[in-house]
Image: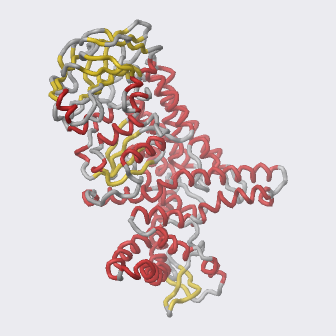
Amino acid sequence: MASKYDGLARIIIQNVGGRDNIISLTHCITRLRFKLKDESKANTDILKATDGVVTVMQAGGQYQVVIGNHVPDVYAVVCEHAHITGSAPASEEGASDMSAGAKVIDFISGVFQPSLGALAGAGIIKGVLALWVFIAGQMGMDATTNGAYQLWYAVGDGFFYFLPFVLAFNAAKKLNMNQFSALGIAASLLYPSMVNITSNEVMGTVFAGTAFSMDYYSTFFGIPVIMPPSGYGSSVVPIILALLVASPFEKWLKKVIPDTIKVFFVPVFLFVVMVPLTYLVIGPVSAVLCSILQLFFGALFGLPVVGGLVAGVLIGALWQVLVIFGLHWSLVPLAIINMSTQGFDQILSTSFAASFAQTAVVFAVYLKTTDKKLKSLALPAVISGICGVTEPAIYGISLPKKKPFIISCIAAAIGGGIIGLTSVKTYTMGGLGIFGFFNMIDASTGNVSSVIWGAVGVIVAMAVAFALTYMTYKDNEPSAAPAKKATAGGNEVRKVMSPMKGNVKALSEVEDEAFSSGALGQGLAIEPTEGRLYAPCDGVIETFFPTGHAIGMSAEGGVELLIHVGMDTVKLNGDGFTPKAKQGDHVKKGDLLLEFDIAKIKAAGYSVVSPVIVTNTDDFADVIPNDAAAVNAGDEIITIL
């Protein structure tokens, strides 16, 4: 089925180096996250200039194409056209080129990102239920006995309790391990009789007298079976470490066990070895590692008077920088660990004001700017930011403008300092943005002090961000972007001349649905009778594809044009195309830009019908194609109002 993102998907696939250059693809809330065999094959400048792409980032071993809130739709179309299955690797070739740190970040994000939506959804339900308990308690009622509460709490809390299952499924996929075998190991950690083992009489203690002291209630051939006091429900590290060990073991088993019995005996030996190993070694090691991390952050937040303040300022200031590079995922597992062992977390609490600071900055820009295109970007970014998704605001507005982004970091540091100083706690991983306040309600006691102080931190951060931006922002500030495109404005009539000689066709007659549907913009098509392409107007060549088959121009008055010579001619890899200009050139109407061999293109089996479209059609009242049957180069073909 045709999608309005077909054209964008094709452009993205082509400019990340083609299908063969893609190892794997995942997405988060706003980004397509590619793992590429060779990032040097990607045309980053072309992607950045593509309508529908906010920007491109290269971090953590990933090639990240920032799309916006509709990224799931674009992701589905990219997967369809590239014939890939999302995060399932197409090949492991090239993966070893990543640094150790990049591999860690890539693995962590790959484990958590696929389930982020469900994780947030369950958290929102849990947060709303906590609010229900608080309100009911103020009226002398107990909401926890209500049947509706119990049913909704079963999913709100249940998703987190069975988190090892979720992480096992995602991690196994990332590690190229059998996902059902991974679920079997996770099931052993949550099996009721093992969960309830802590109700038995204590048989002994390991690491007695230290911060890592742990009791055990059973033995495995005389070796203590150690179970954390809170069990493995909602745990993060144990199952991940277990699968990091299990994955290579499974691969080895597949090599040594005969094919005729492999399907049964690989899981048998895997379970027989890995389940005891997880309980006897990996689980206790995980508990020690978690304890060390908790001791570190506990010591930081526990510094007299200034501990929470220092942590809050540091995390608040750096949070958006971490988001840019995708490194914020490194803190998420720590927060989940804290919630499962302590019942609350303070690490991510200090980052809470950052999204609101960013939103306030963009709202100030929206009110101050006279740039219509910037306004059209800013308002959706504000709405998105209120809901906690700030990538459109960061990449589309504040980061290119530099100063607004710096202001947002300063304001986030102030808000984070207040939140850290007042020990604001988060009790569940739930919604982002304004929905995040629900996460700060302590359902067990009905305490809402964290909500109050969290709101204070947010309000102060927003006030500082808004005031500083409103006082300092100017439309003529330098941009970090490589080039500033002209914006549409005014009511004058604009004319586009024909770039070539040939027969005119309606855009609907073009074989490619991305063009014929109008998804890429309105215009017409020309079947050329002469292999020369001229500039249709005065302007700048914003994009000249290396293969020579397509040219993107920005013209005076804010008109953005795309001229695409033939259909699927990118597959010719430039054969038959001779560019006479280059990307970045300022050209005059009638300048020769390209020569192409019509006979060679047809002989290769490709159509020479060439769309000429206005890619920013939505910026104008109307785009009216000429109804002439044939045109010469330089004839008027499109009128823009």
Which of the 4 image quarters holds residue 42?
Answer: top left
Q: Residue furthest right?
A: 140
Q: Residue at x 28, y 12 (%)?
A: 631
226 above or below 395? below
Which residue is found at the position 44% from the left and 41% from the top?
Answer: 74
Q: Quadrant of the C terminus?
A: top left
Q: Can residue 280 be seen at all in this image of the molecule?
A: no
Task: Judge left or right: residue 287 versus residue 41.
Answer: right
Q: Is residue 401 visible?
A: yes
Q: Nearer the viewer, residue 587 or 294?
A: 587
Looking at this view, is 225 or 270 the one in front?
Answer: 270
- As drawn, the residue found furthest toward the top would be 492
Foreground of the two, 588 or 79: 79
Coordinates of residue 284 in the picture (x, y in percent)? 48, 77
Residue drawn at x 42%, y 45% as measured from the top left: 323
The picture quadrant where one finds residue 428 is bottom right
Q: Does 244 sit left or right of 635 as displayed?
A: right
Could you say where residue 57 lies in the image, as x and y percent from the top left? Answer: 34, 42
Is 181 above or below relative to 87? below
Q: Residue furthest bottom?
A: 222
Front position in the image: 417 or 3: 3
Where in the figure is residue 618, as x and y percent of width and height?
46, 21
Up the image or down, 299 lies above or below 182; here it is: above
The image quarter containing residue 511 is top left
Please provide percent x and percent y for residue 106. 37, 56
- Total numbered circles: 0
